Each structure stands twice: as structure tokens, then as C-alpha cells.
């Protein structure tokens, strides 16, 4: 493998549940104020804020539906319709700068090539692909209606059925190719880019599979290695939609389970754990990402406590990339989010997160959703307490039956480690009581 190939983001050779970048294993942690981050003002300042707290992972929807955004095409005249054969200088200029800024900071971006919410309802009225907004085709020629008033989940638009195995709309597909080529021309030389085909889609699997194959073919022509996935809409990870990613490693080299973040508590953990086992059973272990962690007091997908718990459960269960969703649906890159990103990075510096396995079986007298455990057998255990706690950790199998152990507490809400202390188990069990009765705590237990 060439030096350039080894420096790109790819599954870690020692444990392909995780990523490596520039030849080193890397845990991806993030949060941001927006999803199409390249479109915001002060993007450099925002990326610095992320890097300062130990973050290295952002979402990048190729979207233009928010106020202040620009679309990816030039107009045929000053205020005329768009020309889909003329790439938009401002749009792609913003994106190029974003690529440079993230690469300089070793930040990985997960691109969503097609965001379905740009192709329905109010955004569709402004979208250049709408026949009324371009000089390239009519409704009759393209099959695209000028109005789509339903939620994109209703699948009213033929935009997502253009590929040969569906409706084979060659005219529309040609313009989609042009758009994808502009994206790939800029991203394929970059080693810090992951590709997701869609934003929470429920379209036919043939759509995403086509674009994954297209991206891989272009990467092969360029002589580079890339990694792709699809993000499904189903909240239940056992839904057959998700089988189209974990069950098809020939198509998708990593998976995204962001919609698991619609679940809470023990169910959230159990679903992620079961999904992880499906990947093991598939015989093709791959990284599992969650680019959208929902939950904030101002949103509709759980409270801020839910968002923080979801973030930590996914870190402990063995997810390779965890990011807080944008404000109103998540904690974004708020001060609170930054503290937990920093704490997760601090844990990874003291505990081999990427060498650990989920190990709730070691927790004794555990209440529902009280705590979650990861362990490196014979070396260390990390236990996350959702809101204080009092339980026992079984250390007998790791040789900790009666010898003294090191115990250290991380206050995740303030990013502060306690001084290392010693603790002696009794009958192979170590009693763990959080320093306070409430709060987000991590216990780090290892041999003295």
C-alpha cells in the first residue's frame, strides 16, 4: 500500500470496528452548529472551537435550504433561472475552503451526497433541479413536478428513482452525474472524507447502491480508496432497511446508525449492541458511525439528558464516530457538548477505548439504565454512570479477586479527573459508588 493510501481515513487494521487516519487509530468525536457547515459564516472559528475540545468529526450535508446558503449552480442570467451545466462558483468555493480547513485540523467530514429535505416542500421551490428553476429541462422532459408538498418520506419525487435499476431516467441522471462529479473532483484527492449517500432515506436500496458504486468507480479511476455508507430512516435497527448496509459489505464499507438515537435508555444500548453483533456475524467487521446524536431541551427528540446519555452509551458500546446533532435537535457544539467531547477524549487518553469490548455482564446489582461498562480483559474497565450510582464490578476474571486496584473518577460534565486512588475488591467484586449521588461519571479501574 502506498504512503498516500495509508494516510487516508480507512478502517483500522488492528480492529476494523474503528477508523485510522494518517496511519494512526482515531476515535471520531464531534458536534457542530449546522450540518452543511461549509455554508456558515465564521466556519474557521467554529472548527477551531471543535478542535480545541478534542473534536475531529463533522457532518457535511451538501444542502442549500437554509437562509444565507447558496445553490451549487450559476444562473443563466443575473436573476434568471439556473443552468445545471454551470457549477456555482460561490457554492464550490465555500466547499473547497471547508475541505482545506478540515484537512489542516485533521477533522474528518462525513458527507451526505443527497439530502432529501432539499427536494420537497418549500426548499423544492428554490432548488435548481426543479424544472421551473432551470433552463435545462421541463417537467414533461424530466418527469419532475414543480410542486412537492408532501414530506420527502412520501416518496413523491422521481428524483430518487432516476438510476437504471429503477426508472432509468437518463436525462435527469445525466445532470445528477454532473453534480456528483463536481463533488468528487474536489473530495477524492482528500484523505479526510467519508461518503454517505443520503440523509435518513426510505427510498429503494437500488438508489443508494448505485451512487455508492459510482463513487467507488470514480475513486478507482483516481487511484484512491474511499468508504461509503447509507443512512436509513427506520428508527428500529432491526428493520429490514438497515440490512441493506450491514448485510452488504460489498456495497458499503461502514455503517451509520444515527437513527438509533431516536431511542433512549436501555433500549438504545441493547439495539446498538445487537447491531454490533450482526456485523460480527456477517463476517465483515466495519466501523459503526453515528453522525447525528439527537437530544436537547428545545427539541422534539428527547431532552438534553437523553442526548448526553446517547453520546456516552455509543462511546462505551464501541461506536467509531459519535457527533452531537445540530441545535434544536441536539446539543450541537454548545459549551455543554464541548465538555462531554473533551471528557470522551480524556477517557480515550487513559483507557484503551478502541481495544475494549462492551461488558455490562461485569456489572452486579445494576439498576436499569444506571451504568454501562467497557473492558479490556485483564487490563482495565471503564464504567459510565448516567446519573450517579452504586453497584459492584466483577473483577474476578481479570485477576483482581483480592489484590489492590487503581480507581479513578472522571466527572464528564466538568472534564475533571480525580486523583488516582486505590480500592480492594472483596470476593472478586469491587464496590463502585460515584463521588456524588447525581451527575455523569466514569470509573476507570485497572491494576495498581
Image (cartoon, rainbow, N blue to C red):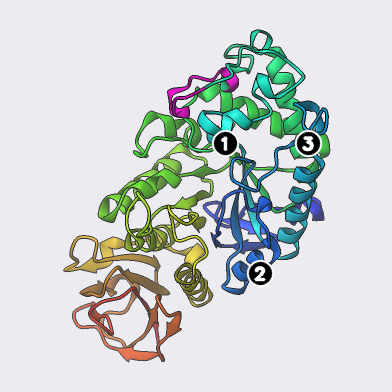
User: On the image, which quarter does residue 177 sit in?
Assistant: top right
Q: Earlier in the sequence, mark 1 or mark 3?
A: 1
Q: Earlier in the sequence, mark 3 or mark 2?
A: 2
* Few, some or many residues within 10 Å of mark 3 (<14, 14–19, 20+): some
| Secondary structure under the numbered disc 2 in the rendered image | helix
- Cβ atoms at labels 3 and 2 below 8 Å apart: no
Residue 110: image location, x then y, percent: 61, 48
Can you name the residue that lies furthest to the front here? 79
Name the residue rendered at 37%, 53% in the picture.
299
Does residue 335 sit above or below 62 in this rendering? below
- Residue to which mark 1 is pinned: 115
Does residue 189 sit above or below 3 in this rendering? above
Alpha carbon of mark 2 to alpha carbon of mark 1: how far? 26 Å
Residue 310: image location, x then y, percent: 37, 58
Alpha carbon of mark 1 to alpha carbon of mark 3: how far? 16 Å
Does residue 219 sit above or below 309 in this rendering? above
User: On the image, which quarter does residue 130 sit in?
Assistant: top right
Residue 301: image location, x then y, percent: 35, 50
> Nearest the camera: 350 or 130?
130
Does residue 310 sit above or below 419 in this rendering? above
- Residue to which mark 3 is pinned: 182
| Secondary structure under the numbered disc 3 in the rendered image | helix
The segment highlighted magenta reads 148-159
> Nearest the camera: 242 or 351?
242
- Residue to which mark 2 is pinned: 48
- Cβ atoms at labels 1 and 3 below 8 Å apart: no
Name the residue rendered at 27%, 71% in the picture.
387
Amino acid at each position: 500500500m502506498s504512503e498516500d493510501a495509508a494516510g487516508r481515513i480507512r478502517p483500522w487494521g488492528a480492529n476494523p470496528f474503528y477508523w485510522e487516519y494518517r496511519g494512526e487509530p482515531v476515535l471520531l468525536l464531534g458536534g457542530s452548529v449546522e450540518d452543511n457547515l461549509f455554508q456558515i459564516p465564521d466556519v474557521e472559528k467554529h472548527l477551531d472551537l471543535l478542535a480545541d475540545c478534542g473534536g475531529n468529526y463533522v457532518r457535511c450535508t451538501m444542502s442549500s435550504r437554509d437562509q444565507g446558503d447558496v445553490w451549487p449552480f450559476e444562473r443563466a442570467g443575473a436573476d434568471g433561472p439556473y443552468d445545471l451545466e454551470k457549477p456555482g462558483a460561490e457554492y464550490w468555493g465555500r466547499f473547497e475552503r471547508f475541505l482545506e480547513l478540515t484537512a489542516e485540523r485533521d477533522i474528518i467530514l462525513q458527507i451526505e451526497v443527497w439530502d432529501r429535505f432539499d427536494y420537497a416542500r418549500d426548499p423544492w421551490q428554490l432548488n435548481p433541479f426543479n424544472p421551473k428553476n432551470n433552463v435545462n429541462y421541463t417537467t414533461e422532459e424530466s418527469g419532475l413536478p414543480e410542486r412537492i408538498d408532501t414530506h420527502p418520506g412520501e416518496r413523491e419525487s422521481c428524483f430518487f428513482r432516476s438510476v437504471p435499476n429503477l426508472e432509468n431516467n437518463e436525462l435527469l441522471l445525466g445532470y445528477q452525474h454532473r453534480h456528483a462529479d463536481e463533488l468528487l473532483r474536489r473530495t477524492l484527492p482528500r484523505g479526510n472524507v467519508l461518503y454517505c449517500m443520503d440523509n435518513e432515506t426510505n427510498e429503494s436500496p437500488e438508489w443508494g447502491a448505485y451512487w455508492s458504486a459510482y463513487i467507488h468507480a470514480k475513486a478507482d479511476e483516481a487511484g484512491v480508496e474511499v468508504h461509503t455508507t447509507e443512512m436509513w430512516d427506520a428508527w428500529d435497527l432491526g428493520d429490514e432497511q438497515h440490512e441493506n448496509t450491514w448485510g452488504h459489505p460489498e456495497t458499503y464499507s461502514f455503517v451509520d446508525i444515527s437513527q438509533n438515537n431516536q431511542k433512549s435508555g436501555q433500549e438504545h444500548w441493547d439495539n446498538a449492541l445487537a447491531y454490533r453483533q450482526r456485523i460480527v456475524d456477517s463476517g465483515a467487521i466495519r466501523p459503526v458511525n453515528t453522525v447525528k446524536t439527537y437530544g436537547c431541551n428545545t427539541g422534539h427528540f428527547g431532552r438534553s439528558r437523553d442526548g448526553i446519555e446517547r453520546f456516552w452509551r455509543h462511546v462505551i458500546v464501541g461506536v467509531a464516530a459519535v457527533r452531537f446533532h445540530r441545535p434544536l435537535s441536539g446539543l450541537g457544539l454548545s459549551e455543554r457538548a464541548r465538555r462531554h467531547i473533551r471528557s470522551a477524549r480524556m477517557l480515550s487518553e487513559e483507557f484503551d477505548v478502541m481495544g475494549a469490548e462492551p461488558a455490562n455482564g461485569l456489572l452486579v446489582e445494576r439498576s436499569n439504565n444506571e451504568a454501562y461498562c467497557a473492558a479490556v480483559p485483564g487490563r482495565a474497565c471503564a464504567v459510565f454512570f448516567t446519573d450517579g450510582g452504586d453497584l459492584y464490578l466483577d473483577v474476578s476474571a481479570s485477576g483482581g479477586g483480592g489484590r489492590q486496584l487503581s480507581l479513578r473518577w472522571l466527572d464528564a460534565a466538568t472534564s475533571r479527573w480525580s486523583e488516582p486512588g486505590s480500592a480492594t475488591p472483596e470476593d472478586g467484586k469491587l464496590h463502585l459508588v460515584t463521588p456524588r449521588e447525581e451527575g455523569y461519571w466514569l470509573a476507570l479501574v485497572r491494576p495498581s
